[in-house]
Amino acid sequence: MMIGNKKLTQSIFFWLFRIMSTVVVLVLLTILYFVFSRGISTISWDFLTKAPEDGMVKGGIFPAIIGTLYLIGGSLLFAFPIGVFSAIYMHEYIKKGKIKSFLQLMTNNLAGVPSIVFGLFGMALFVNKLKFGDSIIAGSLTLGLLVLPVIIRTTEEALKAVDDNYRMASYAMGASKLYTIKKIILPIALPDIITGLILSIGRVSGETAPILFTVAAYFLPKLPHSIYDQVMALPYHLYVLATSGTNIEEARPVAFGTALVLVMIVLVTNLIANGVRAYYHSKYKK
Amino acid sequence: MVKKVLNFLQVGVLATSSYVTSIVVLLIIIFLFNEGAGVFTKSLLEEGFVIAVNKSNKLNAISPKDIKNIFDQKITNWKQIGGDDNAITLFSIDELPNFYTEEEIGSDFEYMDTCINNYIANHPNVLAYFPERNVAKNFQGKMIKVGTLGVFEFVKGKEWLPTARPVAQLGILPLLLGTLMVSLGAILLALPFGLVTAIYMAEIAHPVARKVLRPIIELLAGIPSVVYGFFGLIIVVPIVQKVFSLDVGETALAGSIVLAIMALPTIISIAEDAIRNVPNNMREASLALGATQWQTIRSVVIPYSKSGIMTGAILGIGRAIGETMAVLMVTGNASNMPTTFLQPVRTIPATIAAELGETANGGLHYSALFALGCILFLATMALNLYVQLALKKRNR
Amino acid sequence: MAQIETKNVDFYYGAVQALRNINLPIEHNTVTAFIGPSGCGKSTLLRLFNRMNDLIDGCRLDGSVEINGQNIYGKGVNVEELRKQVGMVFQKPNPFPKSIFENVAYGLRVNGVKSKSEIEDRVEASLIRSALWTEVKDKLNRSALQLSGGQQQRLCIARALAVEPSILLMDEPASALDPISTSKIEELIFELKKNFTIVIVTHSMQQAGRVSDKTAFFYMGEMVEYDSTTNIFTNPKQERTLNYVTGRFG
């Protein structure tokens, strides 16, 4: 009897779990289906290469795509080297102790700062204090600060995964620390570092709150001439189309198309990142 | 020699880089608090306006709250705020034509200053509200100092009307409650579903199912919040409206649901990692004693991974509190005191996002939004520190 | 009748055959040692007796394993009930991160024992049987993780004994322990033999010689020889056994 009870409890709970998990998976799949099914009909060559027309209800999203590309490039140009350098120093140079835990604490704190606070900070420092105005450089720096902890973390993980024996072997042959890092450790950790870089592209491309007051333009059909110009950006464009365009209902198809482009960026970067990881890991094993 | 210098420089660059995050955190604190502090030092009076009384009035300063009450006609006698027992005569510049003829004011309003001056001088019980540039050279009234905002009024005030005239109302209680409601609702929805799904994926489901689901969940964790907001706007909001037969579907509930959906991928992947970190020999030990798989999950796997699961939950809360765009798009953003989940609310991040674009740099409203940013920063920072200290304790 | 009997057992991990045609009877209240080089299938066979291998995907068994005359891979067999009857001690001590008391009580609780006094009595009895009682009786509420490795392993034995199995499987129970703890475990095995049928996998031939009545030698998934321990070590019939016990390979 006891045994029957145990089994019964188990199957009741397992069924409950199965049902709840199915609900979750269905809801999540609904979102993907929603974006794909309704966005796909909007996507065309013209949509991707033309400027918005007729109060943004027609035409394409080319300026927003270009703007987002500028922001991705600008922010990573700044955050990638600093992030990688920082991780190398924190992982390879500093010994365990107060300074190291302080730096890690600060990095984790920065990672937890809400994106709208980055927006406030970027506006106060880059736009107002440094007088960059609403510009690509102000937006890129703000976004760069936002992904900096992400890059540091993934790089640290990559360095952690490098077997200590390689370090020892290199030192044993009289190589210096810097030489060992450059010639032994970085090449081994590179695929994972690159994976982190690619994933942060997805993150940068979708952030809206940090660019609201630092770079994003409501409507700007021409392309930027310098880093001090404003640009349109995909996530802000979607926000505008969804909530405050001149004609929200008519703008729906464009909004769905924009949402799909955003999701595709994340999807493609995820696929590439997984591909890079899988390729190097299989190569490594052989 | 050259090599040595080069080496030193390179290590120096690495070291400097590692301090960037700390410096940024410090800068954020400095800028946020510096700008935010202005909300307690700047006059609440609309910029470029003054409040004046007759010279005979013994009051020199009136609190912002009293001024609001006077203009709302809730205070009608000077006695109520410590003056003599006389009814208050309100005067604002729009009323000038009621007391003076066009000729007296002048065709180009060139005598307006004099008229105001005269009106104040002739009415002993007047409280006048007019632009600073209309103060006459030989002004015969008395300027009233309007006090600044107190910390308590800021936190406990129930009205958020940053552009109200003549004094701005900067009570953040409705925004605080709105934020708490939306994020609490989200966590209450997301935690049970997220944890159950994580346990199911890690312990019960077929490994093939896990292999398929894991990348999908990673993809969903990376989707931008505006896309979730857009989804919420088009799917969740109408459903909420229909199910509860409301006039508007943009409610705290809609915000909670959208946030919960957004938080699910994060919670699932952190919790699943924690569960998969439970050593297999723990499971084997339990099963070898005749425990069922469910008993093993409940009494061994979950307790073992509890702190990892908690970390995920708390980080999820932090993210929910700070989330801006999705919430902004689906909660309706009414800044009144929330009472139920079925009414529009406005959260702190949404307030910043919606209003910062319209404020004058360095103005009172601008400072108020930075003060909101400080609150947000402190709240998420506290959660973060708590998680990190808890993790450290566990690792020791 | 033998208590455990395998009949024509073939076992596969996916496409890899881990055991070939194993026929092995194990008697009541004896200690049987499985020896052989690593990867020979001795642990796999041990784990067949309480169906722990069920947890691994893509494994398959042909033939039958009978315990007390019943095929434990037959239809309608309750795996939990079987595991209650067949206790197991693992290579590395694996106490739960709970108190000492709760570790031993765990098996009782999952098997539906509710009475507080009964649980207390059986926890005490099991700890006495596993020769740990005097060392832990004053700190039953402390975390089991504070015990030394050897104590942890005896705690795991107590935990297995608490559900009153008739068979005890031990998968290299002393391989992670120091010599003193090892000898304590070996003494314990000698004590427990009176009430339990014990099957022990070991990589140490000295240990097999010290504790077991019978020894089976495995090589490449086959059972090469099965005989009394004295015969295996002093007078093996197969040359491969001789080579192994005299240390020529493995």
Image (cartoon, coloured by chain):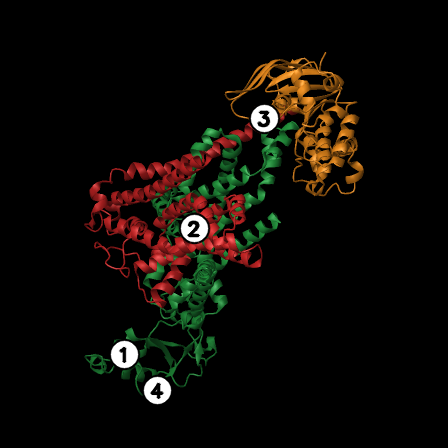
Q: Amino acid at mark 3?
A: Leu
Q: Residues within 10 Å of mark 1 (few under 14, many from 20)?
A: few
Viewer-proximal residue among C161 and B112: C161
Residue A166 point in image, percent of width and height: 51, 44
Write down the colour of chain B. green
Tell if the residue under mark 4 belongs to the same chain as the one under mark 1: yes
Q: Chain of mark 1?
A: B
Along the polypeptide, which appears first: circle 2 or circle 3? Answer: 3
Write down the colour of chain C. orange
Measure how far apart labels 1 and 3 are at the Cα level.
87 Å
Residue at the spot of label 3: A8
Residue C136 point in image, percent of width and height: 77, 40
Looking at the figure, which quarter contains the N terminus of chain C?
top right
Viewer-proximal residue among C154 and C184: C184
Image height check: is C230 above or below B1? above
Residue at the spot of label 4: B140
Secondary structure at badge 3 equals helix
Residue at the spot of label 1: B99
Tell us which disc is closer to us: 4 or 1.
Answer: 4
In the image, B339: left or right of C159? left
Tell if the residue under mark 2 belongs to the same chain as the one under mark 3: yes
